[in-house]
Image (cartoon, rainbow, N blue to C red):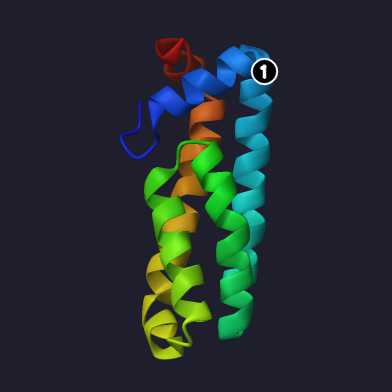
Amino acid sequence: MVKSINAETIKRLAEEVGEETVILLLNVFSDELQQYLRQLSDQPSVNQVGEISHAIKSSAASFGADSLAEMAQECESRVRQGQNEWMVDHLPELTQMVKGMAHEYKQLAGNDQSINRLF
């Protein structure tokens, strides 16, 4: 299991919706992150980054991407506080985290051995 994914969160989700549905949801989440990655890579305004961060925050927390959820929350908060320079400086870090997590979740969803170890 990839260390950056909270296995307990994925297990709880599987208990709620079933193992097969969890795999589908992991793929959907990965695709969602890919969409956010495209938006972040398209020179968004600081306000747009705040909106994207808000959207990422809750989804990431729901799927156990705790570090990404924390980073998204921090970005959203900094944008609300008008700390545009901070956000510009940290946009590459957010973008890289989104990219990495999209890849990790796609791999997890496509790897029966990793999924089975969770359950």
Quadrant that contains the N terminus: top left
Image-quadrant location for residue 45: bottom right
Q: Position of residue 24 (x, y in %)?
A: 68, 27
Residue 42 visible at all? no
Q: Is residue 52 above or below residue 2?
A: below
Q: Is residue 3 above or below residue 56?
A: above
Image-quadrant location for residue 38: bottom right
Image-quadrant location for residue 117: top left
Assess disc 1: are there few (<14), some (14-19) or many (≥20) residues with their C-alpha within 10 Å of its C-alpha.
Answer: few
Residue 85 or 104: which is nearer the viewer? 85
Q: Which residue is at 57% across, 73% downward?
A: 50
Q: Residue furthest front?
A: 81
Q: Position of residue 97 (x, y in %)?
A: 42, 57
Q: Which residue is at 61% across, 81% downward?
A: 47
Q: Name the residue beneath numbered marker 1.
A: 17
Q: Which residue is at 61% across, 66% downward?
A: 52
Q: Which residue is at 57% across, 13% downward?
A: 15
Q: Position of residue 5 (x, y in %)?
A: 40, 35
Residue 30 visible at all? yes
Give the structural element (helix, strand or loop) at label 1.
helix
Q: Is residue 109 above or below residue 101?
A: above
Residue 3 or 84: which is nearer the viewer? 84
Q: Position of residue 111 (x, y in %)?
A: 50, 22
Q: Amino acid at mark 1?
A: Val
Disc tally is 1
